[in-house]
Amino acid sequence: MSATPHEVGSGRLVRASTLGVLKSEHTRIVVVTAYDTPSARLLEEAGVDAILVGDSLGMTVLGFDSTLPVTMDDMVRHTAAVSRGARRALVIADMPFMSFQATRADALRNAGRLMAEGHAGAVKLEGGAAVARTVERIVSAGIPVMGHVGLTPQSVHQLGGYRVQGRSAEAAVALLDDCQALQSAGAFAIVLECIPAELARHASRELDIPTIGIGAGVGCDGEVQVFHDLLGLSDFTPRHARRYAEVGAAIRDGVAAYATDVRAGIFPGEEQSSRMDLEALEALEARRSAGRAAPDGE
Ligand code: KIV
Protein backbone atom coordinates (compact mmCIF):
# COMPACT_ATOMS: atom_id res chain seq x y z
CA MET A 1 0.00 0.00 0.00
CA SER A 2 1.43 3.39 -0.87
CA ALA A 3 1.86 6.03 1.85
CA THR A 4 -0.38 9.09 1.96
CA PRO A 5 1.52 12.40 1.77
CA HIS A 6 1.38 12.92 5.53
CA GLU A 7 2.82 9.50 6.25
CA VAL A 8 5.99 10.16 4.27
CA GLY A 9 8.88 12.36 5.40
CA SER A 10 9.93 12.83 8.99
CA GLY A 11 7.97 16.03 9.65
CA ARG A 12 11.08 17.65 11.18
CA LEU A 13 12.65 20.88 10.00
CA VAL A 14 15.47 19.82 7.67
CA ARG A 15 18.83 21.58 7.86
CA ALA A 16 22.02 20.73 5.96
CA SER A 17 23.27 18.80 9.00
CA THR A 18 20.02 16.75 9.08
CA LEU A 19 21.09 14.98 5.88
CA GLY A 20 24.15 13.61 7.73
CA VAL A 21 21.87 12.37 10.51
CA LEU A 22 19.67 10.63 7.93
CA LYS A 23 22.76 8.90 6.48
CA SER A 24 23.81 7.74 9.95
CA GLU A 25 20.28 6.38 10.51
CA HIS A 26 20.41 4.59 7.12
CA THR A 27 17.36 6.56 6.04
CA ARG A 28 17.53 7.31 2.32
CA ILE A 29 17.33 11.01 1.47
CA VAL A 30 14.72 12.28 -1.00
CA VAL A 31 15.51 15.38 -3.05
CA VAL A 32 13.56 16.84 -5.99
CA THR A 33 14.17 20.04 -7.94
CA ALA A 34 11.67 22.92 -7.99
CA TYR A 35 11.73 26.41 -9.42
CA ASP A 36 8.56 28.12 -8.09
CA THR A 37 6.30 28.48 -5.03
CA PRO A 38 3.39 26.14 -5.91
CA SER A 39 5.72 23.30 -6.91
CA ALA A 40 7.70 23.72 -3.67
CA ARG A 41 4.44 23.53 -1.67
CA LEU A 42 3.47 20.30 -3.44
CA LEU A 43 6.90 18.76 -2.83
CA GLU A 44 6.60 19.61 0.86
CA GLU A 45 3.16 18.05 1.06
CA ALA A 46 4.64 14.94 -0.57
CA GLY A 47 7.26 14.82 2.21
CA VAL A 48 10.59 15.40 0.40
CA ASP A 49 13.61 16.09 2.61
CA ALA A 50 15.21 18.74 0.41
CA ILE A 51 14.32 20.85 -2.61
CA LEU A 52 17.09 21.71 -5.06
CA VAL A 53 16.65 24.90 -7.04
CA GLY A 54 18.86 23.52 -9.78
CA ASP A 55 20.33 25.53 -12.63
CA SER A 56 18.44 22.91 -14.68
CA LEU A 57 16.00 25.85 -14.44
CA GLY A 58 17.63 26.99 -17.69
CA MET A 59 16.35 23.96 -19.58
CA THR A 60 13.19 22.97 -17.69
CA VAL A 61 11.63 26.42 -17.29
CA LEU A 62 13.53 29.05 -19.30
CA GLY A 63 13.75 27.14 -22.60
CA PHE A 64 17.55 27.17 -23.07
CA ASP A 65 19.38 24.09 -24.37
CA SER A 66 21.96 24.07 -21.57
CA THR A 67 22.43 25.45 -18.06
CA LEU A 68 25.12 27.92 -19.16
CA PRO A 69 22.89 30.98 -19.78
CA VAL A 70 21.39 30.88 -16.25
CA THR A 71 22.35 34.01 -14.27
CA MET A 72 22.67 34.81 -10.57
CA ASP A 73 19.58 37.02 -10.82
CA ASP A 74 17.61 34.06 -12.26
CA MET A 75 18.78 31.83 -9.40
CA VAL A 76 18.05 34.40 -6.68
CA ARG A 77 14.53 35.08 -8.04
CA HIS A 78 13.62 31.37 -8.34
CA THR A 79 15.24 30.39 -5.03
CA ALA A 80 13.20 33.06 -3.23
CA ALA A 81 10.04 31.73 -4.91
CA VAL A 82 10.81 28.17 -3.78
CA SER A 83 11.66 29.34 -0.25
CA ARG A 84 8.22 30.97 0.01
CA GLY A 85 6.66 27.54 -0.61
CA ALA A 86 8.96 25.49 1.64
CA ARG A 87 8.60 25.62 5.42
CA ARG A 88 10.12 22.25 6.40
CA ALA A 89 12.32 20.95 3.57
CA LEU A 90 15.89 22.16 3.12
CA VAL A 91 16.16 24.54 0.14
CA ILE A 92 19.47 24.15 -1.72
CA ALA A 93 20.30 26.75 -4.38
CA ASP A 94 22.61 25.97 -7.31
CA MET A 95 25.43 28.37 -8.05
CA PRO A 96 25.16 29.07 -11.80
CA PHE A 97 27.93 29.06 -14.42
CA MET A 98 30.62 31.67 -13.72
CA SER A 99 29.17 32.67 -10.35
CA PHE A 100 32.00 30.90 -8.47
CA GLN A 101 34.74 30.00 -10.98
CA ALA A 102 36.47 33.37 -11.49
CA THR A 103 37.42 34.34 -7.92
CA ARG A 104 36.70 33.09 -4.41
CA ALA A 105 35.48 36.56 -3.49
CA ASP A 106 32.83 36.34 -6.26
CA ALA A 107 31.89 32.87 -5.08
CA LEU A 108 31.38 34.02 -1.50
CA ARG A 109 29.40 37.11 -2.53
CA ASN A 110 27.15 35.07 -4.81
CA ALA A 111 26.61 32.29 -2.27
CA GLY A 112 25.70 35.03 0.21
CA ARG A 113 23.08 36.42 -2.19
CA LEU A 114 21.43 33.00 -2.52
CA MET A 115 21.19 32.79 1.28
CA ALA A 116 20.24 36.42 2.07
CA GLU A 117 17.99 37.25 -0.91
CA GLY A 118 16.90 33.72 -1.90
CA HIS A 119 16.50 32.48 1.71
CA ALA A 120 18.22 29.19 0.80
CA GLY A 121 19.46 26.87 3.55
CA ALA A 122 22.51 25.78 1.52
CA VAL A 123 24.18 26.22 -1.87
CA LYS A 124 25.49 23.67 -4.38
CA LEU A 125 28.37 24.06 -6.80
CA GLU A 126 29.87 21.81 -9.47
CA GLY A 127 33.44 20.50 -9.39
CA GLY A 128 35.85 18.42 -7.30
CA ALA A 129 39.34 19.13 -5.98
CA ALA A 130 39.61 22.16 -8.30
CA VAL A 131 36.89 23.98 -6.33
CA ALA A 132 37.80 22.66 -2.86
CA ARG A 133 39.34 25.97 -1.73
CA THR A 134 36.25 27.81 -2.93
CA VAL A 135 34.05 25.42 -0.95
CA GLU A 136 36.26 25.97 2.11
CA ARG A 137 35.93 29.76 1.78
CA ILE A 138 32.12 29.65 1.53
CA VAL A 139 31.80 27.14 4.39
CA SER A 140 34.08 29.29 6.56
CA ALA A 141 31.53 32.10 6.16
CA GLY A 142 28.85 29.85 7.68
CA ILE A 143 27.17 28.78 4.43
CA PRO A 144 26.57 25.02 3.99
CA VAL A 145 27.86 23.76 0.62
CA MET A 146 26.83 20.68 -1.34
CA GLY A 147 29.35 19.37 -3.91
CA HIS A 148 28.52 17.94 -7.35
CA VAL A 149 30.81 15.58 -9.29
CA GLY A 150 30.57 13.13 -12.19
CA LEU A 151 28.59 14.62 -15.07
CA THR A 152 28.76 18.32 -14.28
CA PRO A 153 26.52 20.01 -16.89
CA GLN A 154 28.29 23.39 -16.63
CA SER A 155 31.37 21.65 -18.14
CA VAL A 156 29.41 19.96 -20.95
CA HIS A 157 31.70 21.43 -23.63
CA GLN A 158 34.80 20.08 -21.89
CA LEU A 159 33.18 16.68 -21.21
CA GLY A 160 32.10 16.36 -24.85
CA GLY A 161 28.41 15.84 -24.11
CA TYR A 162 26.02 14.58 -21.45
CA ARG A 163 27.61 11.16 -20.90
CA VAL A 164 28.41 8.80 -18.03
CA GLN A 165 31.66 9.73 -16.23
CA GLY A 166 34.17 7.65 -14.22
CA ARG A 167 34.02 4.44 -16.26
CA SER A 168 37.78 3.75 -16.31
CA ALA A 169 39.75 2.86 -13.15
CA GLU A 170 41.77 6.12 -13.47
CA ALA A 171 38.67 8.27 -13.86
CA ALA A 172 37.01 6.44 -10.94
CA VAL A 173 40.02 7.04 -8.65
CA ALA A 174 40.08 10.72 -9.67
CA LEU A 175 36.38 11.00 -8.83
CA LEU A 176 36.87 9.39 -5.40
CA ASP A 177 39.75 11.84 -4.76
CA ASP A 178 37.45 14.72 -5.75
CA CYS A 179 34.86 13.50 -3.24
CA GLN A 180 37.46 13.32 -0.45
CA ALA A 181 38.67 16.84 -1.32
CA LEU A 182 35.11 18.18 -1.09
CA GLN A 183 34.48 16.40 2.22
CA SER A 184 37.76 17.77 3.66
CA ALA A 185 36.77 21.26 2.46
CA GLY A 186 33.62 21.01 4.59
CA ALA A 187 30.91 20.07 2.05
CA PHE A 188 27.87 18.59 3.85
CA ALA A 189 26.83 16.29 0.97
CA ILE A 190 27.80 15.51 -2.63
CA VAL A 191 25.66 14.96 -5.73
CA LEU A 192 26.98 12.07 -7.86
CA GLU A 193 25.60 12.55 -11.37
CA CYS A 194 25.72 9.89 -14.10
CA ILE A 195 28.48 7.61 -12.83
CA PRO A 196 28.54 3.80 -12.71
CA ALA A 197 26.60 2.29 -9.80
CA GLU A 198 29.68 0.45 -8.46
CA LEU A 199 31.66 3.68 -8.24
CA ALA A 200 28.77 5.49 -6.53
CA ARG A 201 28.56 2.67 -3.98
CA HIS A 202 32.32 2.97 -3.29
CA ALA A 203 32.02 6.74 -2.79
CA SER A 204 29.00 6.35 -0.50
CA ARG A 205 30.83 3.80 1.67
CA GLU A 206 34.08 5.79 1.83
CA LEU A 207 32.54 9.15 2.69
CA ASP A 208 31.14 10.25 6.05
CA ILE A 209 28.90 12.81 4.34
CA PRO A 210 25.84 11.71 2.33
CA THR A 211 25.95 11.10 -1.40
CA ILE A 212 22.89 12.05 -3.44
CA GLY A 213 22.69 10.19 -6.73
CA ILE A 214 21.15 10.94 -10.09
CA GLY A 215 21.96 8.32 -12.70
CA ALA A 216 24.29 6.70 -10.14
CA GLY A 217 22.41 3.56 -9.10
CA VAL A 218 20.71 2.69 -5.85
CA GLY A 219 23.84 2.56 -3.67
CA CYS A 220 23.88 6.29 -2.83
CA ASP A 221 22.57 7.69 0.46
CA GLY A 222 19.79 9.49 -1.35
CA GLU A 223 18.42 10.41 -4.76
CA VAL A 224 17.70 13.66 -6.59
CA GLN A 225 15.51 13.92 -9.66
CA VAL A 226 14.31 16.78 -11.82
CA PHE A 227 10.62 17.71 -11.17
CA HIS A 228 9.77 17.88 -14.87
CA ASP A 229 11.32 14.46 -15.61
CA LEU A 230 9.43 12.75 -12.76
CA LEU A 231 6.07 14.23 -13.59
CA GLY A 232 5.81 14.04 -17.37
CA LEU A 233 6.42 17.73 -17.95
CA SER A 234 9.34 17.36 -20.34
CA ASP A 235 9.41 16.10 -23.95
CA PHE A 236 12.30 13.78 -23.22
CA THR A 237 12.77 11.48 -20.20
CA PRO A 238 16.46 10.78 -19.48
CA ARG A 239 17.42 7.15 -18.86
CA HIS A 240 18.05 7.84 -15.17
CA ALA A 241 14.50 9.15 -14.58
CA ARG A 242 11.12 7.44 -14.28
CA ARG A 243 7.81 9.22 -14.98
CA TYR A 244 5.62 8.85 -11.87
CA ALA A 245 2.76 10.99 -13.23
CA GLU A 246 1.55 12.49 -16.51
CA VAL A 247 1.01 16.07 -15.36
CA GLY A 248 1.79 17.46 -18.83
CA ALA A 249 -1.06 15.43 -20.36
CA ALA A 250 -3.41 16.49 -17.52
CA ILE A 251 -2.58 20.18 -18.19
CA ARG A 252 -3.11 19.79 -21.94
CA ASP A 253 -6.50 18.07 -21.42
CA GLY A 254 -7.62 20.63 -18.83
CA VAL A 255 -6.77 23.62 -21.01
CA ALA A 256 -8.38 22.02 -24.09
CA ALA A 257 -11.63 21.50 -22.08
CA TYR A 258 -11.52 25.15 -20.96
CA ALA A 259 -11.00 26.34 -24.56
CA THR A 260 -13.98 24.24 -25.71
CA ASP A 261 -16.22 25.77 -23.01
CA VAL A 262 -15.11 29.36 -23.77
CA ARG A 263 -15.76 28.87 -27.49
CA ALA A 264 -19.18 27.29 -26.79
CA GLY A 265 -20.16 30.20 -24.49
CA ILE A 266 -20.66 27.95 -21.47
CA PHE A 267 -17.78 29.35 -19.43
CA PRO A 268 -17.92 31.49 -17.33
CA GLY A 269 -21.24 30.27 -15.86
CA GLU A 270 -23.49 31.75 -13.14
CA GLU A 271 -21.17 30.55 -10.36
CA GLN A 272 -18.21 32.45 -11.81
CA SER A 273 -20.24 35.69 -12.33
CA SER A 274 -21.51 38.46 -10.02
CA ARG A 275 -24.72 40.52 -10.26
CA MET A 276 -25.78 44.12 -9.55
CA ASP A 277 -28.54 45.00 -7.03
CA LEU A 278 -31.87 45.42 -8.81
CA GLU A 279 -32.05 49.04 -7.63
CA ALA A 280 -28.60 49.91 -8.99
CA LEU A 281 -29.39 48.16 -12.27
CA GLU A 282 -32.63 50.10 -12.72
CA ALA A 283 -30.83 53.36 -11.95
CA LEU A 284 -28.14 52.50 -14.52
CA GLU A 285 -30.73 51.67 -17.18
CA ALA A 286 -32.69 54.88 -16.43
CA ARG A 287 -29.51 56.96 -16.85
CA ARG A 288 -28.56 55.26 -20.08
CA SER A 289 -32.03 55.75 -21.58
CA ALA A 290 -32.08 59.42 -20.44
CA GLY A 291 -28.71 59.89 -22.14
CA ARG A 292 -30.03 58.38 -25.38
CA ALA A 293 -33.23 60.57 -25.27
CA ALA A 294 -31.25 63.86 -24.93
CA PRO A 295 -27.98 63.58 -26.88
CA ASP A 296 -25.27 66.25 -26.35
CA GLY A 297 -25.85 69.57 -28.15
CA GLU A 298 -29.65 69.30 -28.55
O1 KIV B 1 20.52 21.55 -11.85
C1 KIV B 1 20.08 20.48 -11.38
O2 KIV B 1 18.88 20.19 -11.40
C2 KIV B 1 21.05 19.57 -10.79
C3 KIV B 1 20.59 18.18 -10.48
C4 KIV B 1 20.33 17.42 -11.71
C5 KIV B 1 21.53 17.48 -9.59
O3 KIV B 1 22.17 19.93 -10.60
Image: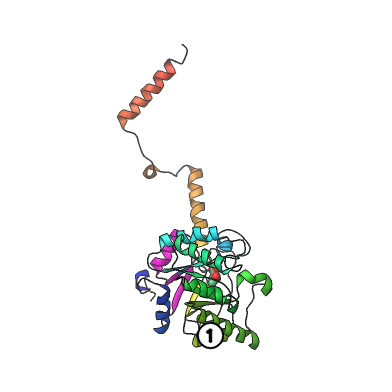
For the rendered model, the colour scheme is rainbow
Q: 254 or 65, which lies in front?
A: 65
Q: Compared to 125, does 116 lie above or below?
A: above
Within 8 Å of ligand 1, the CB of disc 1? Answer: no
Residue drawn at 35 percent across, 70 percent down: 6
User: Residue 36 at x, y = what percent?
Assistant: 47, 59
- Residue 170 rendering spot, x and y as whole percentages: 65, 87
Disc 1 on helix, strand or loop? helix
Q: Is residue 13 visible?
A: yes
Mark 1, Cα crowd under 10 Å, few <14 / some 14-19 / many 20+, is many
Figure quarter occupied by ligand 1 = bottom right
Residue 41 sits inside the magenta stretch:
yes
Residue 116 on image: x %, y %: 45, 62
Residue at x 52% of width, y 56% of height: 252
Task: Reply above or below: 93 against 189.
Answer: above
Disc 1 residue type (three-letter): Ala
Question: In terms of depth relative to the viewer, which is nearer, 56 or 241?
Answer: 56
What residue did someone put label 1 on? Answer: 203
Residue 168 is inside the magenta segment:
no
Q: Quadrant of residue 65?
A: bottom right
Residue displayed at 36% across by 22% down: 286
The answer to whether residue 213 of the structure is visible from this angle is no
* Residue span colored magenta: 28-50
